[in-house]
Amino acid sequence: MSEPVCLVPETVPNTVPETVPDPEFATSSPNPAGGRCLRLLGLDFGSTTSSMMLAEVEIGRHSLTGRMGFGEPRILLQTDAVFTPFQDQLLDADAVATLMDQWLQLAGWDQSEQISKATPAVAGAALITGLAARADNAQMLARLIGERIGDSLIARADDPKLESWLAFMGSCATLSRAWPQRPLLNLDIGGGTTNPALGLNGQVSDCGCYFIGARHFRFEPGSYRLLGWSDIGAGLLKQLGIAAAIGDLLTADQVQQLVAVWVAGLEAIVTGDSQFFQQSDWHQQLLQQPFLTDETGGNQPPLVTFSGGVGELIYQYRQSGEWPATTAFGDLGIALAQAIVRSPVLSASLQHAPEHAGRATVMGLTLHSCDVSGSSLYLSDPDLLPLRDLPIVARLDFDATESYWHKALVLAASCRAGACVAIEQSTTASHASLKQLASHIRAALQSSEFSADQPLVLLLDSNLGKTLGQYITDWGCEPRRLFVVDEIPLRDARFVQIGRPHQHIVPVSFFGMNQEIRS
Amino acid sequence: MKPLKPISAIRLPSIPVSSAAEPELSIELMDNCYRFADLKQLLGAADISKAGERIAGLAAVDEVEREAARKLLSSLTLQQLYDRPLLDRRGRIDAVMQVNYDIDLEKFDSLANLTLGQLKDHLLASKGAEIRACGQAMTGVMVSALAKLLDVHELILLAKRLKNGASAKARTRVGLTGTLSSRLQPNHPTDNLSGITLLAYTGFSMGAGDALLGLNPAIDTVENISTVLHHLDKIRRDVGAPTQICVLSHIKTQLACLEQGAPVEIMFQSLAGTESTLTEEFDVTVELLDKAYNVMREQGPLRAGNGELESAENMMYFETGQGSELTYNKHDGMDMATCEALCYGLARRYSPFMVNNVTGFIGPETHVDNFEMTYSCLQDHFMGKLMGLPMGMAPCFTLHSQITAEGQQMATELLTAAGANFFMDVYLGNDRMLAYFDTSAHDDQTLREVHGLEPAPEYLEWAMARGIFERDEDGQLQRGPNWGKPEQFCQSELDYQRLLESVPAAYGFDNAGPRPADQVTRVLRSNQAVAREAIYADLDRELLAAVGPQRWLESRAATKHDHLSNPELGSFLSDASLQSLQPEHTDVQILISDGLSAEAVHHNIPELIPVLQDGLASRDYQLGMTTVVPYGRVKLCEPLGDALATRLVILLIGERPGGDAQASRSLSAYFAYRVSDDDRAEAVAFSGNPDIRWEYTVISNIYSKGLPALEAGSVIAEKAMQILGFGAAGNRLEARLKQSAA
């Protein structure tokens, strides 16, 4: 095992402008600015469309919150959304490879540098949803991404709550912070699903996923002549008693009936009406990840915003006053957008437009799929990073007893590739309580027979990582593959990835937001 | 812009062969004889008593001696002053003094036989044009001497008469009669472009920035300065305000930026009144200033024939302020006002667009209270105007002086009465980058309304079109419906929100008339109060005793007042303390001092020390007893380390508070490594300093929102391990760490 690496902030006396004659005690900024750039990449492969975004951000301590984070992103490349190349239900590997190569070339991406780890300055994620998330498709995409981008990117498939969260962060987190007292509910409406996310002051409190989308019915562009439908679409036709066949032309009344059901479903999400999704077996099928919150019905109704393809249509109409031609995109999206604008429940706050409505997911993927740690960490073996797909086996309070730690580390010991424990409520730690926590962890590492060469990641939301790591390892004297990563906002997620160190920080990505794990 | 007169063409007096040739400077007053060693002593004694002069030993001992000095000064003729150039420490007429002798010799001949007293009477009886003409015939020394004879009314009255004719023009004309302009200073601690944008938008929305949109950068690199210049240019173009931009980096950096095509519309430099300060501290020579002037004349974006409707007449911008020469101990025995007047004599050579006086910026070692700061500002404004400069004023303060917001506001009222061309606009007066307090756009607008003044005419036209100002039925200028609304320049509420999230210490944007809303003021002032309290609090022995055994020693600063007003005193142990120490030959000595914030010690030491001690103990270092020295400075490490013969002193010391309440509890850890005999050759080679004995590393911003105390303990312990392990600190350590990593 190599020596622990001390990630010390390189604080040097500020270069004080010469108008300050006595720099001795001038208060300097918490972090030297500049020189800490990270490139963020987002790849979004969906049932209908795919796109990519590349941005560059500077890492530094935020001058208001004091937390490490990203500065203003500089968007280097934002591709147009293109139809995901399918051959029947299978992704066309050659077409996908060509597409990715074109995008990366446009972005000036040097694959050899990334693969050789010559420039460890990239983080981000690829999100694979809908049809593209089928196991065979997802594996193929993960392989193609790995070959081109190396191990800095996580590829996640079928993670609907993550998708909802990303769409919120990518489209309306800023708007939410502009109205900090007002809940904000974003509905990300794509081809197959609607992903709601509720947040307050920029923080998401609940996510869900429903099979309500624009592409359950496919039409010949310019008319409502049916070209096909999904299983959910077939169920809806049956619910409404519409006997239609491929090639049939739906009447305006029939189209409105279809759209009305989707709108009723969206209104049920907004008003917290869970009964809607219990009306029939078909209604229950709409529910992929329930949106459990009852906060939407509080005293102050939430601002409702829209993202995804349908959201983009709505806000474009608000700006231009015009809709695209009938079924211009070959689906129900335009009709659904029109119906949303007519719904008093859904259109009450359309004057508050989110940013990036049409590219919310890829924007969220690029800019919000990873957090940056603090700059003083405990990394016993930085060369082991990145650590991928680590299960978060427990979330323990800072004052959890040794028996809780024992249980958590027994569970962690069963994960040979490494595991993670998130430590909550650490912001009021004292020297005594910190030493006690370290003592509990040391004892639990012994009692659980946690192997010294097995990676263990501890995540903290406060800035205590180095000191906790030092006490756990007796200031580096006890050999442990221990990584204490701090200043990370802890999320309800099942897995985490710790990226390679970049100067003094590591990027951290969460995924698997389907269930909560608590002690 | 006119061509520069060659330096060699400036006529100089001959230097007296010996001091014996100097006529005796003595005077009888009320049966007492007052003798002054030379003109420098006389000039110092004739001024009001200021902290800087007291430290330098130049202040009169009492009011009678001061009046004696003034009486003697009053009797000297201009010719006598001309014939007595104040020499530098090497007995030369230095380059700054040389430039000061570039005067209107014909006019001087007509005044040469007037005593200073007679000249004062003549000026008080004259109108602006004659006063201005006399100023052109005077060196900085003569102007300073004259200023010593003027009372407050006279300083204001004469300056007021000089207002007409003290304007200068770049894109806007600043300094016209009936106007009060401002420099918008959107400083941000990390040069964050969004933060800069919001502060600029806010200033413009309040009618500020007609003199300049000018930023003090946090990072003085060509790349960063160019980026910020282009950004300020974009803001100016987007907003449409007729003004000019500047980034106040070093003149060499700006020249490099201009060379690369950055919009250096106004060329900035800080000036000093002695050549040694100018060259050794500011890294600037008269030749370099000449070069910058000529480059701007030939290549500046606002030069004649470069596409602007009207070309600029002035493109240089200088900052000065009494005391900088003194704090570097390079004042060559001259008092602060005289050094300042010599700055103006240098500035005059370049027909600047702006000269900004920042008296009060340095701290209590030059100006300790409201009176000293205000009086110096009035002197400086008068002296600059008399020498033909477009003077703007920045009466300002740091929290470790006794200058208050109220005192600063009174100074601005007097300076507005005197006809200052411009003030600063720092949002809410709290500079987020330089940790000091200046005037704000609220102050500037209030002063306009109190004194019936308007912005520069080109800017006013724009601001009225934007609804920022409007005329009432009587033709009086009033704030318009868009005054104080920065969001008017944003594309959407989201753009505005993004900008809001990037500015620290912006306690709100609500206004009450031309003033900030009371809720905003209350947050601002309470944070200032907490920060100031941190400076004036004393170390709490009981609290610190709980951390473990300690040895308490004393510095040479016997009182808080001594400590704040004379930084040198805190750099040494008192004789008694020094004599109590014996060599201990330890590895590490922890030293705690309040520095400029005892609260920083109180809030961090109890959690930091145990972690640090545990970390050091893990490597079996020999550790001396933790030592506490109230009223200490960083250099205190050296006498303590020498006396104890320790390898490494770790000094935990309070930083100078800015305006943020939390940051006033910010601690720094200085590592002073005593270079061993084994490492000396390498340290000498690395530093180029043959006498190097100590190397320093610092970790700063130890407080709850920076590096918390618990985490700082292990960070400091690890850094100490590196220093002792590699036998190096500072840049030499960083180089060895890089070598080791490679």
Image (spheres, rainbow, N blue to C red):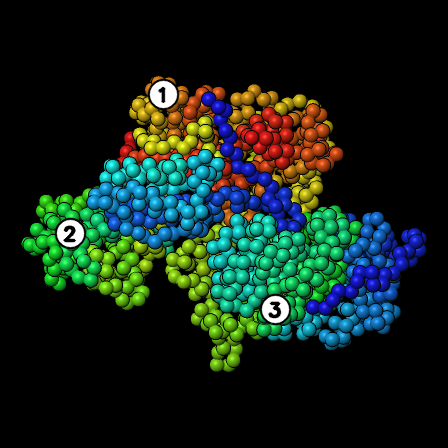
**Image mark 1: chain:** A
Q: CA distance from mark 1 to mark 2?
A: 55 Å
**Image mark 3: chain:** B
Q: Position of residue B439 (x, y in %)?
A: 57, 60
Q: Nearer the viewer, mark 3 or mark 1?
A: 3
- Residue B306: which numbered mark, if any? 3
- Residue A450: which numbered mark, if any? 1
Q: Disc 2 marks which amino acid? A: Gly
Res A475 visible: no
Q: Nearer the viewer, residue B25 or B643?
A: B643
Same subunit, tags 1 and 2: yes
Q: Is residue B454 found left or right of B18 in the rendered image?
A: left
- Residue B431: which numbered mark, if any? none
How crowded pointer 3 is (Cα within 10 Å; few <14, some 14-19, many 20+) is rated as few
Q: Is residue B521 found left or right of B63 in the rendered image?
A: left
Q: Nearer the viewer, residue A261 or A181?
A: A261
Q: Disc 1 marks which amino acid? A: Phe
How crowded pointer 2 is (Cα within 10 Å; few <14, some 14-19, many 20+) is rated as some
Q: Is residue B690 found left or right of B405 in the rendered image?
A: right
* Residue sitting farthest toward the bottom: B474
- Residue A228: which numbered mark, if any? 2
The structure residue drawn at horizontal position 56% and vertical position 67%, both measured from the top left corner, is B243
**Local secondary structure at mark 3:** loop
Q: Position of residue A361 (x, y in %)?
A: 32, 48
Check if mark 3's residue and mark 1's residue have beta carbons within 8 Å: no
The structure residue drawn at horizontal position 46% and vertical position 30%, both measured from the top left corner, is A382
Q: Disc 3 marks which amino acid? A: Asn
Q: CA distance from mark 3 to mark 2?
A: 65 Å
